[in-house]
Image (cartoon, helix red, strand yellow):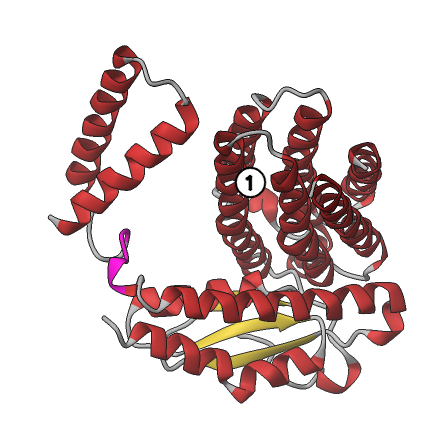
Amino acid sequence: MRHTFTLALSLSVFWLINSGHNTPLMLSLGAISITFVLYIAHRMDVVDHESQPIHLTQKLPGYNTWLIKEIILANILVVKHIWLGNKSISPTMSRIKVSQKTDIGKVIYANSITLTPGTVTINIGKDEFLVHALLQESIDDLQSGEMDRRVTQLESQC
Amino acid sequence: MLIAAILAILVVMVMAFTRGFVGPTLYDRILAVNMFGTKTVLLISLLGFLMGRPEFLDIAIVYALINFISVIGVLRYSDSSIFKDRKLQKKIIKKSS
Amino acid sequence: MDILISTGSSLFLLIGSFLCISGGLGILRFPDFYTRMHAVSVTETLATTMILLGLMLLSPDILVLLKLIIILLMTLFISPTASHALAHAAMRNDLKPELDQKNKDEVMPSNP
């Protein structure tokens, strides 16, 4: 029930931002379409804690600020190596241990790795990821496990 | 400064286009098309601000979604045999014959 | 105040354009598919963020600002998904990456 409510709330916000009209006709059309989408989502059985991870909201801002800082640092590193040329890069492929238990934790970790420039998750296994990196040092950073620790901390809210 | 940004994005689009033509493998081409699409979203937003018509942003949102769906739609067929690496395929054919 | 806002937005747009050009140079310059992917990922994260931030400072009303935030969030959610799908498809179809000399004898994955 909580998840249905948050889904309806986010859909209404999305409608209001995109339409920008406040006439009764427009608002009622919006209400009809939101109800329809909710009905379809219930039929597809996708309204649960995975599509609406509201249990993570408390810790998410802290994690996001840390992730943004990491993204900016990684961007600067990759841009530096683009301008330095092909001699300076050291493409590496490696397996990274994963300590998350739930699917949503693994997805957050894999997405964070891919979102950071310089590292791409290629394959997701049972307890390890296959990661391709532009530089050896990004792999070393990942293997030191700070991101892993933070995602596990975030996930432990569940 | 808007005009400078638009010019920069046009240059990047030309670069992506070049990679799309030259790209040795199929995946390079898909990557170039994906990059071209995301740059188009930025270009539409910038043009909207330059012309003073922020309604263009709606088109940019729709374009971002279409771009994503098209890439995923192409990759949906990556199981089929035409997606295999050409050189590798030739090697396999040589071995088997 | 006006001058401050327009200077800030010009600065953001300039940084975004520079990052875009760097990414475009990277996609032309890097040797193989997997490394080019990192260059594209630069243009899809920080460059997009910077250009959209520069536009956000110029936005005339709150609705435009919210739409720009939606575009930014959408790009940030979409780009890792698309690049993971692309890399996964390439690896599944046996496109081998060019690895560095000293790491060459490491894990070459048995195909998933």
> Which residue occupies 73% across, 54% down?
B87
Q: Nearer the viewer, residue C8 or A127?
A: C8
Q: Above or below — where is C74 with respect to C108?
A: above
Image spot of residue A19 (x, y percent): 40, 22
**Residue in front for this viewpoint, A61 or B58:** A61
Q: Which residue is mark 1?
A: B71
Q: Nearer the viewer, residue B74 or A138?
A: A138
Q: Residue furthest left?
A: A1
The magenta stretch spans residue A108: no
Q: Position of residue A24 (x, y in %)?
A: 25, 13
* x, y percent for residue C52: 63, 43
Q: Residues within 10 Å of mark 1 (few under 14, many from 20)?
A: some
As shown in the figure, which amino acid type bears the numbered disc 1? Val
Residue depicted at x 44% and y 70%: A63
Look at the image and give the residue range highlighted in magenta.
Answer: A51-55
Residue C1 visible in the current orientation: yes
The answer to whether residue B58 is above or below residue B67 is above
Q: Main secondary structure of the magenta part?
A: loop
Q: Residue at x 76, y 60 (%)?
A: C32
Query: Would you identify the image quadrant in which residue B22 lies?
Result: top right
Magenta stretch: residue A52 in it?
yes
Lateral position of residue A29 relative to residue A93, left or right = left
